[in-house]
Image (cartoon, helix red, strand yellow):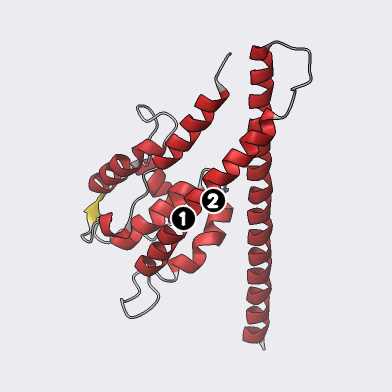
Amino acid sequence: MTIDNEDLLNSIIASLGRIDTISLGEIPNIDLYMDQLTSFMDERLKKTTRYPDKDKILTKTMINNYAKNDLLPPPVRKKYSKDHLILLIYIYYYKSILSINDIQTLIEPLKKRFHVGNDELNLSRIYETTFELQKDELEPLIEDLKKKYERALLTYTDEDISDDERKNMQLFSFITLMSYDVYVKKLLIEKILDNITSDNEKDKKKKGTKDKN
């Protein structure tokens, strides 16, 4: 495989700019039936998939499984609220890197905010904060990718190999750098969630002891 290094970098950066996240104002304020919910998610998040023509964003089976696994509160009279959609958007992004158990731990505080009134810290406010945070991360992320790419271009420059093979190996170096970054961050997230789980279990034991007493 041959590829122009500069074209590849530009293509990656362009693809980041096309990531289509859902703003709070785009989430319907009315309750939706299952088919309406899946159609909305499919329409808004299709571009985030690897194979937009084939990949499914959400299916009825997925949503039912999330409810069974206590990730999502059940619908009310078969309808899903704005808070349901917010939780499902979080679940959609988290499931690509975290296990179901880790997602349960992570969104437990959000479930406690489910259908909380407007005068308190509700899911809409939490989602809006998250949306603003991720917007601010795009430029630093692009700069970091450029640095990793430039570092990868410094590898295999002294090897007695063809230009095509050098490009392939430099591409391998670039992927390795990105993969290590993902690995370390995923490991960090898992460690944090393990600590949260451990603290929650200790709290339950303390509460159980107090109740017995």
Q: Residues within 10 Å of mark 1 (few under 14, many from 20)?
A: few
Read off the residue under disc 1.
Answer: 134
Please identify the quadrant where the N terminus is shown.
top right
For badge 1, the amino acid type reads Gln
Residue at 64 percent of width and 35 percent of height = 150
Please identify the quadrant where the C terminus is shown.
bottom right
Q: Residues within 10 Å of mark 2 (few under 14, many from 20)?
A: few
Side of 155 where 146 appears, left or right: left
Q: Quadrant of residue 81?
A: bottom left
- Whole-percent x, y for residue 183 in the image: 67, 44
Sequence-wise, which precedes: disc 1 or disc 2? Answer: 1
Relative to 5, say whether 89 is above or below: below
Query: Residue placed farthest to the left in the image?
Result: 30
Relative to 184, say whether 169 is above or below: above
Side of 73 where 43 appears, left or right: left
Give the structural element (helix, strand or loop) at label 1.
helix
For badge 2, the amino acid type reads Pro
Q: Are marks 1 and 2 in contact (CB under 8 Å)?
A: no
Residue 157 visible to the viewer? yes
Relative to 198, say whether 1 is above or below: above
Residue 140 numbered mark, or none: 2
- Whole-percent x, y for residue 13 in the image: 48, 37
- Whole-percent x, y for residue 58 in the image: 37, 42
- Whole-percent x, y for residue 193 in the image: 63, 60
Relative to 99, say whether 167 is above or below: above
Give the structural element (helix, strand or loop) at label 2.
helix
- The answer for how far apart the CA atoms under marks 1 and 2 are is 11 Å
